Image (tube, rainbow, N blue to C red):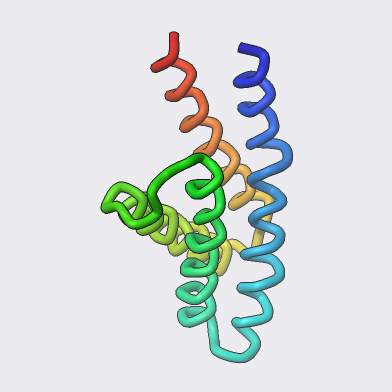
Amino acid sequence: MLVYGLLLVGNIVFIGPAEELLFRGVIQGRLRESFGPALAIGITSLGFALSHVPSYWIGGSDLFTLGVLFALLGIAAGGLILGTIYERTQNLIVVALIHGLINAVGVGITLVMLL
């Protein structure tokens, strides 16, 4: 139970902000300079999804399944949404909080399923 509590808080305070700083703040920002916002969002979203592959691999998932493919497509879609929000607001705090809350909801659902 403590582990899930730490994961809930950690996702909001550390993971969401760290990933958004890297993907939206650094990568998308640099790509925008060279390719414009639309292509920057697309490339960053693809990279964001691919960066989650190791978590499936470490978790023991068969990477060549439709489940993992759809999960990665969902992550890429989330990246498109977060990237668009960032472009419109120019506010990393907003996307970091959204990202952290989405992750925390996933942890919360997992916790409820285990109870």
The image shows residue 9 at horizontal and vertical percentages of 68, 28
Task: Please tell me which residue is depicted at 61% across the width and 27% down the height of the picture.
Answer: 8
Task: Please tell me which residue is depicted at 64% across the width and 46% down the height of the picture.
Answer: 16
On screen, 109 above or below 90?
above
On screen, 109 above or below 112?
below
Q: Nearer the viewer, residue 112 or 63?
A: 63
Report whether 5 appears left or right of 80: right
Q: Nearer the viewer, residue 1 or 24?
A: 1
Task: Please tell me which residue is depicted at 38% across the width and 49% down the height of the picture.
Answer: 62
Give the quadrant of the N terminus.
top right
Task: Please tell me which residue is depicted at 48% across the width and 60% down the height of the picture.
Answer: 49
Report whether 104 appears left or right of 93: left
The image shows residue 98 at horizontal and vertical percentages of 55, 44
The image shows residue 42 at horizontal and vertical percentages of 46, 74
Q: Nearer the viewer, residue 47 or 35?
A: 47
Report whether 84 appears left or right of 113: right
Q: How many marks?
A: 0
The image shows residue 92 at horizontal and vertical percentages of 67, 57
Residue located farthest toward the left when viewing the structure as drawn = 66
Give the quadrant of the C terminus.
top left
Residue located farthest toward the top when viewing the structure as drawn = 115
On screen, 12 above or below 31?
above
Residue 25, by quadrant, is: bottom right
